C-alpha cells in the first residue's frame, strides 16, 4: 500500500478533475490561488494506516500541524482518528470538532503554563514531555488542580533519518526529546511524583522518511527502554512512534507502510503495549493541490520564467526546503514542453515554486495545479507582501464546498493603528 498513491486526480477529456469536480470550474467559482482537497483521498490515506495496523492495539493520531483546517479535522474525527497537537491553538481546533480527549496527545518542546492547564482541563490521553523542566511544570499544574497528569517522555533515540536537515529530529544534535541516557533517571523522578501518571514512551525521528529501517530502529529503542522501565515497576502502556511517514512527491520509491506495519506487529504481538502513530503528511499531503493562474511568461535567451499568482507566502516548501512539487496544466494541450522557473509575484529571489523545470508550454491566463500540497501548505502560508492567504475548498465526488474563505486586505490591516 502506498499512502501517496491516492490523490483523487484524473484528466477527463483533457481537463483535470479532483474526484468528480472540474478544477477549472472551481478556479472560476472561487478564484486563485486556491487550495483544493480530496475528501476521499484523505479518508483513504487514513484508513490505510488503520488497516495496516489493525493486527495490534493501536491509535492513529493525525498530526494537526500538517493541515489544521476544521473540515479535515472533523472528517478525520468522524473516521475515528485521534490527534497529535503541539499548541493551545491546535487543542482549541480539535476540541471544536469534538475530538475524544482520550485520543489527544500533546507534543512539542515549548508548552506554556496556560497550554498545559488547557490540556489538563480537557483530559487528554498524554503529554509527550520533552525535558525535565517541562515534566516539573506539568506536575505542578496538575498539583494546582488537585489532579493527576498523564505523561510520556519523548526520548531522542539518536537514529539518523535520511531527510532534509530542517525536518530531521531524532539525533542528539537536535533540540527535541530527552537523550536516551538521561531517560531512565527522568522516568524514576516522574514515578516519584504523585501528580504524574506515566502512560508511555514517545519518539519522533523526523519527517518525509521513506525508509522502513529508521522507524524500526527507533521503535526498538523506545521498546527496549519501556521493557526496562516495566521491569522496574513503571507501568508503560503506550509506545508512541511519532510521525514522519514519507510520501511520493516525484519519483521516490514510496515508504512501504505494509512492511513497516508487519515489522511493528512482530515486535508488539504478545506484549502489553499499545502503539501510537502520529502521521500528518501521509494523510493529507497527496490529497491536496494548489491552483494558480499564469500571469506572465518571460522568455529570455538565458532563462524563462512563468510568473504565477501564488508565491512563497502561499506555499513555502520549495523556497524553504528546496522541495519538489509537480506542476501540471489544468488543460492537457498538444503543445510542447519548455524549461522554466515557475515563480511567484513576491519581491524575493527565493520566491519560486519550481526551478529549471520542464513544463508544458503555457501562456497568461492558463491555470496550473501544484500537486501534493495538502501537507504543510496552507498552515505555513503567510501574509508577506500584504498578500491575503488563499481560500480552501473540499471536494467530495462532484460536490465542492468552501472550507475557508479567502482573506481580505481589510482583515489583514484591521488590527493595526496609525
Ligand atoms: N509528530 C511530531 C512530534 C512531529 O514533530 C511531526 C512533524 C509529526 C508528528 C508529523 O510528521 P509527518 O507525519 O507530517 O511527517 N514543514 C515540514 C515538515 C515539518 C514536520 C514537523 N513535525 C515540511 O513541509 O516538510
Image: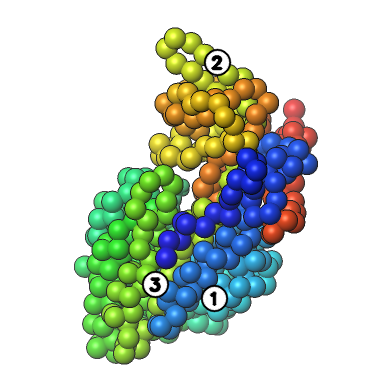
Question: What residue did someone put label 1 on?
Answer: 103
Q: Specify how the rendered protein is coloured.
A: rainbow
Question: What residue did someone put label 3 on?
Answer: 240
Q: Nearer the viewer, residue 52 or 418?
A: 52
- How many residues crowd around disc 3 within 10 Å: few (fewer than 14), some, or many (20 or more)? many
Instruction: Tell me how far mark 2 sits from mark 1, CA to CA.
Output: 51 Å
Location of residue 295 by image quarter: top right
- Location of residue 389 in the rendering, given as x and y in whole percent from the top left corner: 66, 39
Ligand 1 is found in the corner quadrant, namely: bottom left
| Residue 298's disc number | 2
Q: Nearer the viewer, residue 118 or 51?
A: 51
Q: Quick check: can you spot residue 397? A: yes
- How many residues crowd around disc 1 within 10 Å: few (fewer than 14), some, or many (20 or more)? many
Q: Which element is circle 2 on?
A: strand
Q: Identify the residue shown where x is 57% and y is 61%.
A: 42
Q: Which element is circle 1 on?
A: helix
Instruction: Tell me how far mark 3 sits from mark 1, CA to CA.
Output: 12 Å
Location of residue 310 by image quarter: top right
Q: Nearer the viewer, mark 2 or mark 1?
A: 2
Instruction: Tell me how far mark 3 sits from mark 2, CA to CA.
Output: 50 Å
Amino acid at each position: 500500500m502506498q499512502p501517496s498513491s491516492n490523490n483523487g486526480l484524473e484528466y477527463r477529456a483533457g481537463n483535470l478533475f479532483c474526484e468528480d469536480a472540474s478544477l477549472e470550474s472551481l478556479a472560476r467559482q472561487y478564484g486563485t490561488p486556491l487550495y483544493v482537497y480530496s475528501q476521499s483521498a484523505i479518508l483513504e490515506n487514513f484508513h490505510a494506516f488503520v488497516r495496516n495496523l489493525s493486527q495490534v492495539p493501536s491509535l492513529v493520531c493525525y498530526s494537526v500541524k500538517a493541515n489544521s483546517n476544521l473540515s479535515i479535522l472533523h472528517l478525520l474525527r468522524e473516521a475515528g482518528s485521534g490527534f497529535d497537537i503541539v499548541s493551545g491553538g491546535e487543542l482549541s481546533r480539535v476540541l471544536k470538532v469534538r475530538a475524544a480527549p482520550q485520543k489527544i496527545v500533546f507534543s512539542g518542546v515549548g508548552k506554556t503554563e496556560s497550554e498545559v492547564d488547557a490540556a489538563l482541563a480537557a483530559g487528554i490521553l498524554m503529554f509527550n514531555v520533552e525535558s525535565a523542566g517541562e515534566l516539573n511544570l506539568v506536575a505542578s499544574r496538575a498539583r494546582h488542580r488537585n489532579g493527576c497528569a498523564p505523561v510520556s517522555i519523548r526520548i531522542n533515540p539518536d537514529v539518523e533519518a535520511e531527510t532534509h536537515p530542517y525536518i530531521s529530529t531524532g539525533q542528539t544534535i537536535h533540540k527535541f526529546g530527552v537523550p536516551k541516557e538521561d531517560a531512565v533517571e527522568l522516568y524514576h523522578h516522574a514515578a516519584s511524583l504523585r501528580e504524574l501518571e506515566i502512560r508511555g514512551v514517545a519518539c519522533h525521528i523526523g519527517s518525509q522518511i521513506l525508509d522502513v529501517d529508521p522507524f524500526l530502529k527507533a521503535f526498538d529503542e523506545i521498546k527496549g527502554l519501556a521493557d526496562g522501565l516495566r521491569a522496574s515497576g513503571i507501568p508503560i502502556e503506550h509506545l508512541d512512534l511519532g510521525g514522519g511517514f514519507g510520501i511520493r512527491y516525484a519519483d521516490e520509491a514510496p515508504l512501504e507502510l505494509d512492511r513497516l506495519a508487519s515489522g511493528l506487529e512482530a515486535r508488539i504481538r504478545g506484549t502489553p503495549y499499545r502503539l501510537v502513530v502520529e502521521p500528518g503528511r501521509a494523510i493529507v499531503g497527496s490529497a491536496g493541490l494548489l491552483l494558480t493562474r499564469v500571469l506572465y511568461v518571460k522568455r529570455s535567451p538565458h532563462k524563462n520564467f512563468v510568473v504565477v499568482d501564488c508565491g512563497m507566502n502561499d506555499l513555502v516548501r520549495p523556497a524553504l526546503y528546496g522541495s519538489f512539487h509537480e506542476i501540471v496544466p489544468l488543460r492537457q494541450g498538444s503543445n510542447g514542453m519548455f524549461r522554466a522557473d515557475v515563480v511567484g509575484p513576491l519581491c524575493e529571489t527565493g520566491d519560486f515554486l519550481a526551478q529549471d523545470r520542464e513544463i508544458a508550454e503555457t501562456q497568461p491566463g492558463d491555470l496550473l495545479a501544484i500537486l501534493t500540497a495538502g501537507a504543510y501548505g496552507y498552515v505555513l502560508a503567510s501574509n508577506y507582501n500584504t498578500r491575503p492567504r488563499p481560500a480552501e475548498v473540499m471536494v467530495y465526488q462532484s460536490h465542492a464546498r468552501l472550507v475557508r474563505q479567502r482573506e481580505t486586505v481589510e482583515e489583514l490591516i484591521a488590527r493595526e493603528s496609525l
